[in-house]
Image (cartoon, rainbow, N blue to C red):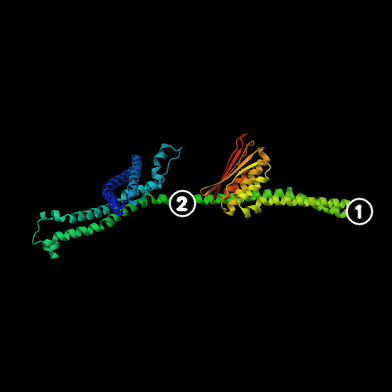
Amino acid sequence: MTSPAVRVVRQLGIDTQYALLGLPLSIITFVLCLTGFTVGVSTVFIWLGLPILVGTFWAARGLATLERARIAPVLGRQLPHPYYKRPRPESGWVRRLLVPVTDGQSWLDLLHGVFRLIPNLIGFIVAVTWWAITLGGLTYALWGWSVPMDPDSQDLPVLLGMGGSRAVFYTALGFFFLGTLYPVVRGVALMEAQFARLLLSNVNTLREQVAQANAARDTAQAQKAAAVSAEAIALRRLERDIHDGPQQRLVRLAMDLGRAEQQFESNPEAARATVAEALTQTRETLDELRALSRGIAPPILVDRGLKAALTALAGRCTIPVDLDAPAMERLEPTVESTAYFVVAEALTNVAKHSHAAEVQVTVRRAGNGLMLTVTDDGVGGASPAKGHGLAGLADRVEAAGGVLSVESPAGGGTTLTAALPL
């Protein structure tokens, strides 16, 4: 492991070369950018200035890329390469030529090329001054004897009453500047680097943050829309199931009880048979209501967790189910409910449409996600697209922030995979 002293010396060398090389580079950049821009703008009306102007922007971009590479060791991190506007594939050569002129980051590169001379000049002067006094003061005892001293001069050591002790004074001065060398050089290097980062990277960072915020907003809106769609589909399915099942049985039950009431006086035996049949209808209606409630919030899922609920679900399936679900700690209620709904809906579709002989259900926790896989050996042809039976399932998974994929080639079975975030 590198010692702190070695790290300080290494960083001092990096900051020194950054400050010293900054001035000649800034002079070249200043002359190139300012001259190219001035000549290009002044001659653009005769079309000669257009390629000069575009060439200036490309040169400024190249020098900005070089500066980003130089900044990295000073700041201790690599600056991201900014986004530059690109021409459209169908654009003509004139539009392609003008793309750098219409790009905001290219103008910032040019602006940096013109004004970087100011902080680079300040950094160069300060760095050279501190290094010169440090080296000169520390080595004064070696070369100070060669410098003649005029007795009548108003030399600083004479004014301080030091006389022949000027070697001690300059050596002490050298140690003082040595002690402040690292923070001073580090400060001017950071000043230059932060000025460059402000123009060459900050705007791009802000643009990326805005893009991430927009992406997060779009994702949230998509999840909200998927949740609304999934809820609407679930409500329509529940309404259809109630109408086709329990509601019809309750209508028949009411008719049977009415008929039994009329039969009690004239034919008690027939009335008893009608009541017995009504009791059977009542039990079947309760069974159907329990089955419907399992699709909403099965008690076993709430009480005993996902594995127990899936085990019960597999036991009720009309097709043999090979369940691979290791024991795991309780998850978020929304995650468990969504996972149960995925497997339940998948097994229902397998039983109704796949003509499969066997189905495999696998549940795995991978990192920060829960992976569900339902595979059958049926006829295939399933699709999660809108208008198909799996569309509501895809919306349910998306509303939970997950992803659903379906592989179902014709005649090759179906593999449904859902990834849910934890």
Local crowd size for mark 1, using a 10 Å CA cut-off: few (<14), some (14–19), many (≥20): few
Q: Residues within 10 Å of mark 2 (few under 14, many from 20)?
A: few
Residue most extreme to the left? 151
Locate residue 18, reporting x and y percent.
29, 49
Q: Is residue 123 visible?
A: yes
The residue under label 2 is which amino acid type?
Val
Q: How many marks?
A: 2
Closest to the observer, 106 or 216: 216
Q: Earlier in the sequence, mark 2 or mark 1?
A: 2
Q: Residue furthest front?
A: 327
Residue 210: mark: 2
Between disc 2 and disc 1, the foreground one is 1
Residue at position x 68%, y 52% from top?
293
* Alpha carbons under labels 2 and 1: distance apart: 82 Å
Q: Quadrant of residue 314?
A: top right
Which label belongs to residue 266? Answer: 1
Q: Is residue 154 above or below residue 226?
A: below
Location of residue 387 in the rendering, given as x and y in whole percent from the top left corner: 64, 42
Residue nearest the observer in this picture, 371 or 63: 371
Most foreground residue, 341 or 208 = 341
Furthest residue toward right? 266
Question: Residue 394: which numbered mark, if any?
Answer: none
Identified by mark 1, the residue type is Ser
Residue 239 vs residue 403, the one in the foreground: 403
Q: Position of residue 324 (x, y in %)?
A: 59, 44
Disc 1, SS: helix
**The quarter of the displayed image where residue 49 is located:** top left
Asked if the residue at tag 1 contacts the one at tag 2, i.e. Cβ–Cβ closer than 8 Å, the answer is no
Res. 229 visible in picture = no
